[in-house]
Structures are given as C-alpha cells and as structure tokens.
Image (cartoon, rainbow, N blue to C red):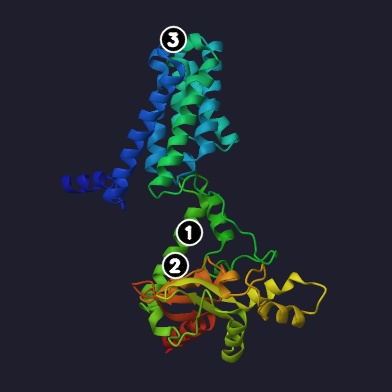
Amino acid sequence: MAQSKWQWLLRFYPAPGSVDRYERMRACSGALFGLVITGLTTYLILGKDVHAMWLIAPMGASSVLLFAVPASPLAQPWSIMGGNIIAAIVGVTCAKLIGEPILAAGLAAAVAIGGMFAFRCIHPPSGAVALTAVLGGPAVHAMGYSFVLVPVALNSLLLLLTALFFNNATGRRYPHVTQPDRTSKHNTTDVAPTERIGIKPSDLDTVLTRYNQVLDISRADLESIMLQTEMQAYRRRMGEVKCSSIMSKDVISVEFGTELAEAWEKFQSHDLTALPVIDRGRRVIGIVTKADFLHHAEMELHEGLGQRLTNLLRPSQLTHTEKHEVVGQIMTKEVFTADANQSIVDLVPLMSDSEVHQMPVIDEQKRLVGMISQTDMIAALFEHGLAEGT
C-alpha cells in the first residue's frame, strides 16, 4: 500500500528534460546579462532619485521566458511589451479606484489576463506587474500612471533588446515565427506537398480547438515537431538509406569562369536541367539551371527567345562589358546541398515544399561527390514501397 502511494506521488515528478548542458548555461547567462544590462541602463537613464524602481521584480520572471524558452509564444516581443503595459495600466487603475488591497489585487490580475487574451499578448509575469501596481506600497502609488512608462515599459523594452541581441548572438532565433508561411509559390490555394498526406493543418486546428487550452508552444513549432516525428518514424521503418546510395556519381559540373556557351552546350549534350558550380577544390559555390539562362535572356524583349538566347551565349569580345559572359554571373549562389551520409528522408521537404529539383551531394571536406534529382528520390521511395509490400 505504501509503495503504491509513493508510485502515485512519483507521477507528479517532472520527466527528465531533453535540454543539454550548453542550453542550460546559455539560459542562465542570458538572464544574468539581460537583467544586469536592464538595471544598469535604467539607473543611468533615471539617476539616483528612482531608488528601488530601477528594476521591478516581474522582470526576473520575464527573463526566464525570454532566455530559457525564447521560442514560446509567451516570450515574444508583443507578449512582453503588450502584456506588461496592459497589466500596469489595469493595476494602477484598480489601485486608484478600489480601496481594499486584496480585492484590488485580485481584480487587477483577472482584468489583466482578460486584456492579454483580447490583445493576444499573454505574458505570465504581467500578472506580477498588475500586483506590483496594487501592492507596491506608497512609492508605487505616488507614481500613478507614470509607473506604466517608468519603470514598466522602460524595463520591458530594455530586457527585450538584450534578449534580441543575446539570443541571436548565441544561435537562438528570436523573435520566433508564430504563424507558418502557407503562401504557395505558384500563387494558388494548394498547400505544400508534404501537407497533403499524413497529418494536415486542418487536423491540427481541429485538435487544438478541441483541446481548448493555452499551449506554451507556437502552432508552427508544434506542427514542425509532428512532421519531424513522422519523418523519424518513416526513417526508422525504411532504414537509413543514404544519399550516397542513390546519387549520380558521374557529375557534370562547371566553374565560375566557364563561358555561357560552353555551359549551355553541356546542358544540351547531356540533357541536363542543372549544373553545380564548383571552385578549383571541387567545393560547391552555386548552381546554374536552364531557367537561369532563360531568365537572363529576357532582357531584349523585342527579339524572339531564340535570338535573345543566342545574344546571351555569344561572347562580346570586349575587355569591359556589362553583358553576362560566364556562369558565375548568372548562377544561384544560395544552393541547398546534401551530405553523402545523410538520410534521403531529410531531403523530402526540400524537394517537395521548397521545390528543389536537383541537389549537389558533398563529402566531409565539402567537395562535390554526386548529384540527387527528384527522379532519384521517387525511384528510391518506390523501391522501398515495393519492398514493404512483399
């Protein structure tokens, strides 16, 4: 009986987290950096007459969100600024209108929460801001509505600026995107290919509506985690099929200084649609496609396409010209690459949603060793489907 009681109590003990030591140190260092800078800057701006109002206590709670969980919707810029300012206004108003501190404190917190819901800026430490305005004592009450600007708005802004700097400087994207970009590249109403099967956005919306609670994670992050979980499960089922297993190894490539006519001839003779651009060490520096040629051939619209393409490919024979002469002048520099030992499952979102048709494959030294096309991917996934069916 005693053992079952302890087991029942242990169910309330939090499960081990998945955050490593570096991330914990980063969060602690961020809070130290943010609060010290915020306090010192407020002191330098306001001087000695402000006394204890250089840094209010709720900023400590805000620092936990901004530096420990910067991806949370509760930690975003609009949340901290909007939530704290709304709470401060509500708190000062309740302190002025209601003489009973306990009632004023409870009403201030309740109304502040309602305001944060209405303006989509829920920030838990803002509840403490509302209580500080009511229970902060004569010094806070004497400030009246100036408490909203100084120190609440000033502290919030300074802490936000330190979070913007520190999180991005230490490799954490902040602010965090809370709404996924569902804009079709073709300006149509179709969703991305990876969203047409499996768990759909509408499925997630339905479940979240049914769940009917505030989640400390953005909808976009939740959807991303679910997609990655699906991919991990698929990777486990199909095994680790590496890029090196399905890539083309006899790769036709060009260099930055390859003349356009020579590159176009390679397109035609090898029936290709894309060529990786490499340096002398065979490191990928870009990619050039037939679409790049056609795009740059559109400059002389009064001529036919064939003539415009001919003009683009023909060398100018001049020492100085604004005309594009070599591949490096028309290539795409932002190029997706795959590692030879990478699972092909990782490439599915890039080749479907991002519409990457061909992807160079590199080795540990970042040298070009192969090329993977959408055709290679389809063949590999088809073979796996047949194998599962047998």
Between the residue at mark 3 and the residue at mark 2, the CA separation in whole angstroms equals: 56 Å
Where residue 306 appears, x then y in whole percent? Answer: 75, 83
Front residue of 2 and 87: 87
Q: Quadrant of the C terminus?
A: bottom left
Give the answer, above or below, for where 370 lies relative to 121: below
Q: Which residue has dot 2 on it?
A: 230
What secondary structure is marked by label 1?
helix
Q: Nearer the viewer, mark 2 or mark 1?
A: 1
> Quick one: label 3 or label 1, which is nearer the N terminus?
3
Kind of residue at badge 3: Ala
The alpha-carbon separation of the residues under discs 2 and 1 comes to 10 Å
> In the rendered view, does 290 fall on the left or right side of 306?
left
Name which residue type carries label 2. Glu
Q: Under tag 3, what secondary structure?
A: helix
Q: Mark 1 points at which residue?
A: 224
- Answer whether residue 122 is visible to the viewer in this image: no
Between 265 and 246, which is closer to the camera in this rendering?
265
Pair 3/2: label in front: 3
What residue would you read off at disc 3?
A: 139
Residue nearest the viewer, comparing 264 with 214: 264
Residue 47 drawn above or below residue 275: above
Q: What residue type is labelled 1?
A: Ser
Q: Callout 2: helix, strand or loop?
A: helix
For the residue carrying disc 3, how many other residues have a C-alpha within 10 Å: few (<14), some (14-19), or many (20+)? few
Quarter of the image holding residue 184? bottom right
